[in-house]
Amino acid sequence: MANDTLPQNHLADTIQALKNGLTALPISAAMDNTEAWQQEFLLSGIPELQDIAREIGNLQSLLTAAKLDGPAIGRSLSLLGSQTTQFAFKAAPEQQGDIRTIGDQLLRLGADLQAQPA
């Protein structure tokens, strides 16, 4: 991953999936998407992306639990949104807007889930 540039097709796919809402995305597609990001970030050598990858692993565990915990999933999404937004400032200039969009969507979805009763 040269110069902190993320795969553009992954960015576009992720933005579209998040805009459609969490319930519109089958769990298998969500897992495939998060797995692709996690692997990309773990191999990046960039500490901020590796932190995001670890939180993606936590989110995957929450999504595959026997009983889904909406507020816990919301907290994980919010943390991912915050981490993503922070990384946007270090990303390639042409991708900063898309990365902030993903961060904003994650923060919004996370807040929505945290507001729901457990």
Image: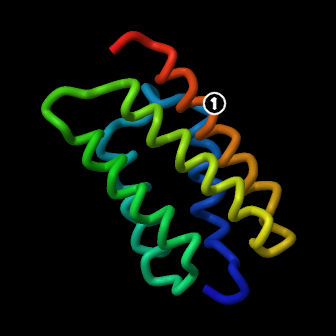
Please provide percent x and percent y for residue 43: 45, 83
Q: Which residue is mark 1?
A: 108
Q: Residue at x 13, y 32 (%)?
A: 66
Q: Residue at x 50, y 62 (%)?
A: 52
Q: Identify which residue, 7 or 105, lies in the foreground.
A: 105
Q: Identify which residue, 75 or 32, lies in the foreground.
A: 75
Q: Identify which residue, 106 or 76, lies in the foreground.
A: 76
Residue 26 relative to residue 44: left or right? left
**Residue found at the very far top of the displayed protein:** 117
Q: Split into 4 quadrants, where in the image is the N terminus?
A: bottom right
Quadrant housing residue 96: bottom right
With respect to residue 72, does 1 lie above or below?
Answer: below
Quadrant housing residue 117: top left
Please provide percent x and percent y for residue 79: 53, 46
Q: Split into 4 quadrants, where in the image is the C terminus?
A: top left
Q: Residue at x 57, y 81 (%)?
A: 46
Please provide percent x and percent y for residue 104: 70, 41
* Amino acid at circle 1: Arg
**Residue found at the very far left of the displayed protein:** 66
Quadrant housing residue 11: bottom right
**Helix, strand or loop under label 1:** helix
Residue 89 relative to residue 45: left or right? right
Q: Residue at x 33, y 57 (%)?
A: 57
Mark 1 crowd level (few <14, some 14–19, many ≥20, 10 Å Cα): some
Please provide percent x and percent y for residue 115: 51, 16
